[in-house]
Amino acid sequence: MRINRWVLLGIVLFFLAFPVLVPSDYYRHIFIIALMWVLIGSSWNLLAGFTGQVSFGHAIFFGTGAYTAGLCVTKLGISAWWGILLGGPVSTLVGLFIGWVCFRLRGPYFALATIAVGEIFRLVAIDWRSFTEGMEGILIIQTFRSKLPYYYLGVALAALCMFAIHRVVYSKWGYYFVAIREDQDAAESMGISAFRYKSLSLMISSFFTGLAGAFYMNYMAFIDPHVVFNLHDISIMAILVGIIGGVGTIWGPPVGAFIMVFLQETFRSSFFGLFPRWVSESHVLAFGLLVIFVIRYLANGVIGDWPKIRRLWTREKAYS
Amino acid sequence: MEILVQTLVSGVLIGGIYALIGIGMTLIMGVMKIINLAHGQLMMVAMYITFVLFEYFGLDPYFSLLVSMPALFLLGIFLQKYLLNPLLKVDSILPENQVLMTVGIGMVLTEIIRFIFRSDYRSVKTAYSATALYIGPISLNFPMVVAFGIALLLTAALFFFLLKTDLGKSVRATAQNADAAMIMGINAHWITVLTYGLGSGLVAAAGTLLLPIYYLFPDIGGPFTLKAFVITMLGGMGSTIGAILGGVVLGVAESLGATYISMALKDAVGLVIFLLVLIFLPGGLKTLTKV
Amino acid sequence: MAYFQTEHLTKNFGGLIAVNDLSFQVEQGQIFGLIGPNGSGKTTVFNLITGYYPQTSGTMRFKGSTIDGLPTWKVCKLGIGRTFQVVKPLRRMTVLENVMTSAFNRRQSMQAAREKALEVLEFCELSKKLDYPAKGLTIGDRKRLEIARALATEPELILLDETMAGLTPQEQREGVELIRRVRDTGKTIIIVEHIMHVIMNLCDRILCINYGQEIALGTPAEVANNQAVIEAYLGKE
């Protein structure tokens, strides 16, 4: 789905103007979180949707990036903003290690391994108190009181990530990634080292997710193992963002990110106060039902199954 | 020395129950070629059923087996027939759709239970929960021994089923080659449905047996799903004997970890073993025994 | 030293000996046939050459150096391409994208890969179907695509695994034509085939195997008249 350049310009302008048009800190916050998920979802999608390696452990990279930024403060005595520069590379190194361990496994077994490694990271982060401050977490002082700097940084990072992924996908590497996804054995016989290219995909993926983590540390000013190495809130959320939007597409994850974050917020606030309190506690239930529904009926996501959605719409119109 | 023996014995006892969890998952893996990430959650549901029967009807957990196993068997069949099987026909980019579906199912089960029961820790304390048997200086927790015994019985029954009955052989045939099995007149569709039910029933038994010696809260499913696949990887995917070995190894390893390293990292032990197996022994212990 | 040769190549699958002490030589520019009844080990030989799994014993040499133990992708880089018996198109990519992926083996830029891919597709007469998704192709076109993909990696030696199976007689004729044209561009070909008239017409030399072992090696005429070969096939055409 190649997007018209005027539409693209329109989107960019909208995002640049948004905080001015909507001066509410509440909505700015939601957008910032959604932009962060654009980063995480797009990186997950590069590895899973394009290269076919479905990671259930992206929290590993998010947490690593977040802790890199946090440790800058607690261990190195420098500003957490250095984490924005370091978070990506450190996560990439972790990614290399994970790839070396896990890429010998195919399909669902790779997914399992990523869950296990994710859990190990979480448990180690809890237990290694002298290094990570354990469950107390890391608390820093937020640099800016206004949300605007964080918002625009988020826009910049999201745009950078999408641009990078776009360049990669429409290049030799992109072709190689998809070849590996479609048929790893055939790919090898075409001169593609599956291990090397899976690793490259993972490195890019972990880089941007780590970057998102470092961003999170700077924006939210508090992290702990439960928050950043979380299986459901980070790893599975990343998968949901990818699936809802559409795996294997460039615009899927951004769409998915905004849908998921807004959905989450809608539930958390009990539909903005319209529904009783218990609704807010059922947002995970809603997510679970959404997973089931999407996988069963809309497996290629909103973007991927767009033709299907359109057909449903037009069929309805035909009767009225 | 005494401590070591005690640790080992406890490990083996709980390993027997773990084996039930592992066998269920490995069967599902073998027949359906998917990883059931709702496995622990199914067990959790069974535990809550057992809990309710005990709290409100005074039914002893061991008798609850007669309720929880069939109940989960039916739930498993329902899930497989309406949610998982239909996915086979969908051609999506991600081949792991079935796995993701089980994740969704797990989430929904957990949240429904949380909605009904809240997140409070529950436990079942029967008259004999704290009693111990003694063999010399080694103390054996009575419920654990009974659980181990029942687990053995169930495992034996399962083996009898798989090896001696026609239906059981159909399950094994489908696990080895679904297409060939279909040509031979086996309704592979029903076999997959049955197997998921069977796997669910077995893990229900494990849950019911574990309840007297554990505690219960809605999120307990996750760690057990992880344990289930650690066991399955250890033992070799699809191998029932491997699952038994894997269960015992995990039980003993956790026990040793709890005694000699720390209680907190007990769960990490299983994960580390899992990774070591991945790196050095990708076929699981099964490759060592050449079974 | 021949252009490509195997020496005492053996593959044992834990009790089942799929390839048994095979030694043969292929000269540059030849079309070398590998025939034998079903299950005789032909595809296994190809899998060994391309490094899908390691041999139990024996050596394979290409242009003088051994290729033992090399990963599949490296074998391709060295100049050995292959097609698969059960074709493996990259289903969600178009025909052009499939071949471009192969072309990247020797070309770095999108432009260069595209040029090479278009050239190969022209050669294989698939130009009209550039933008068709691979999963929608007929079996005949899929076989062509398989060959096109192998050619786009710019190999010197190509292994063709039963490229004629399942094709109509007309498609087979076109297939034979294509293979001849490939040889005419200077490539060396090892071809596994069941269809006798194809093999007999195309090949310079033929190796016939059964149960992984050599039962005849020579010119088409020699092999066709070989008693053991006739027996192995039980008079099969």
Image (cartoon, coloured by chain):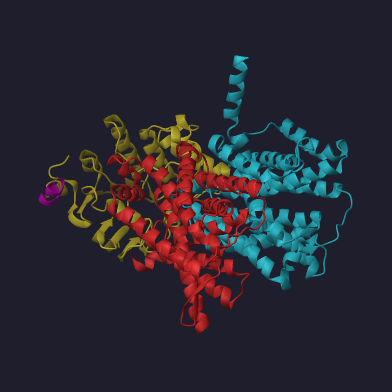
Chain colours: A cyan, B red, C yellow
Residue at left offset 62%, top offset 50%: A236
Outermost residue on the left side: it is C227
- Residue C228 shown in magenta: yes
Between C123 and B171, which is closer to the camera in this rendering? B171
Relative to C125, residue A208 above or below = below
- Position of residue C230 in the picture relative to residue B288 (left or right): left
Residue at left offset 48%, top offset 39%: B87
- Position of residue A244 in the picture relative to residue C194 (left or right): right
Residue B175: x and y, percent? 36, 50
Q: For the stretch drawn in magenta, what is the main secondary structure?
A: helix
- Position of residue C168 in the picture relative to residue A267 (left or right): left
Residue C135: x and y, percent? 44, 35
Residue C42: x and y, percent? 27, 51
Q: Give the range drawn in magenta.
A: C227-233
Between C46 and A247, which is closer to the camera in this rendering? A247
Residue at left offset 83%, top offset 62%: A140
- Position of residue C15 in the picture relative to residue C50 (left or right): left
Question: Would you say residue B105 is visible in this rendering?
Answer: yes
Which image quadrant for residue A276?
top right
The total of numbered circles placed on residues is 0
Question: Would you say residue C162 is visible in this rendering?
Answer: no
Quadrant of the image containing the C terminus of chain A: top right
Quadrant of the image containing the N terminus of chain A: top right
Relative to A276, residue C79 above or below = below
Between B227 and A142, which is closer to the camera in this rendering? B227
Residue A229: x and y, percent? 67, 58
